[in-house]
Image: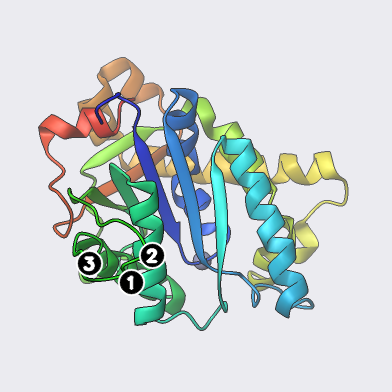
Amino acid sequence: MADSKLCVLVFGAHPDDPDSKSGGTAALYTRAGHVVKMVSLTNGDAGHMWEGGAPLAWRRRIEAANSGKTLGCEYITLDSHDGMLLPTLEVRNEVISIVRNFKPDLVLCPRMWDYHPDHRACGVVVVDAMYMATVPNVVSGAEHLRKMPVIAYGYDHFQKPYPIQPDVVVDISSVLDQKTDALGCHTSQMYEWLPYNRRELDQVPEGEAERRAWLGEMYHARSAKQADFYRAELIARYGEEKGRACVAVEVYEGSEYGSPLTDENKDILFPF
Ligand SMILES: [Zn+2]
C-alpha cells in the first residue's frame, strides 16, 4: 500500500463468479485508480445446455475478458474443467503463482460453504494457497510473499453453519449499471444457461437492448432487496442520508486465515 494504489485479487470458480460477487466493488476500485484482477479457476466448459467442451470454454473466456474490460480490470480464466474443480496441489500451486506475481493487498474469494462443489473447492483452495504463498520452499518459480494479504469472503446467502458476517458493506449504487453491463457480457450465462437452469428461458427477450433492460430490472430488484436487508449496516458505515439512499450493496467478511481485517485497515482497503 506504499504508493496508496491498492492491488485487489478476486477469485471465483466460474467465469461470472468474481464479477457476480464483487463486480461493483471492482468498478469502484478501478474508478479510483486501484488495480483489480479477476480469476476464474475453471474454464466454465460445463455451463450450458447445448454447448460444451473447448468451444464453450473459449466463448466464456472471451465473455469474461469483456466483463473485465467493462469493469476496468484484467479477468483471466484458468483451465480446470467446470464441475470438476478440486482443491488439489496442482490448483493450489497455480493460485500461489498468481498471488505471488500480483502481490495483492486484499484477496476476495467465496466461503467454503455453498451448494456448488466448485464454489466450495474454490474457497478451500484459495485459502490453502494464501499461507503457502509466504513459504519460500513451496513453488520456487515466483518470489514468496513477505506479508500475508487481508482475505475477505464475498456474499452468499447460506445460513449454515452461520450466515456471512457483514464486516464491510460497500455501497455500489453508483456502479450498479456498470456491474450489470459487465454481467451482461456473459451472454452464455445471463441470457442462456442460467435462465434455462431456472426454467425461465422463455422470459428472456429477443433483442440486445431488450434483454439488457430485462437483466437490469432483475438486478435492480435483487439489489434493492439486499440493500434493505443490510440497511442498518449501511447507515452505520455511510451515515443516515447515504445509508438510506443505497440501492445496491456488496458484503464482505474478513477471514481469520489472512492478515486481520481491522477497523483501522477497513477504510484503507475499502476506500469508498
Ligand atoms: Zn459459479
Q: Where is residue 198? Give x, y as percent.
A: 63, 69
In this view, which residue lies farthest toward the top? Answer: 241
Decide: few, some or many residues near mark 1? Use Cα within 10 Å; few <14, some 14-19, many ≥20: many
Q: How crowded is mark 3: few (under 14 residues within 10 Å), some or many (20 or more)?
A: some
Q: Is mark 3 within 8 Å of ligand 1?
A: no
x, y percentage for residue 51? 78, 76
Q: Residue at x 16, y 60 (%)?
A: 257
Would you place residue 70 above or below residue 254 in this image?
above
Closer to the N terminus: mark 3 or mark 1?
Answer: 1
Q: Position of residue 121 (x, y in %)?
A: 38, 75
Q: Which residue was labeled with disc 1?
A: 125
Pointers 3 and 1 in contact (C-beta within 8 Å): no
Q: In which quarter of the image is residue 208?
A: top right
Q: Residue 18 location, x and y as percent? A: 48, 53
Q: Say which amino acid is labelled 1.
A: Val
Q: What residue type is labelled 2?
A: Val
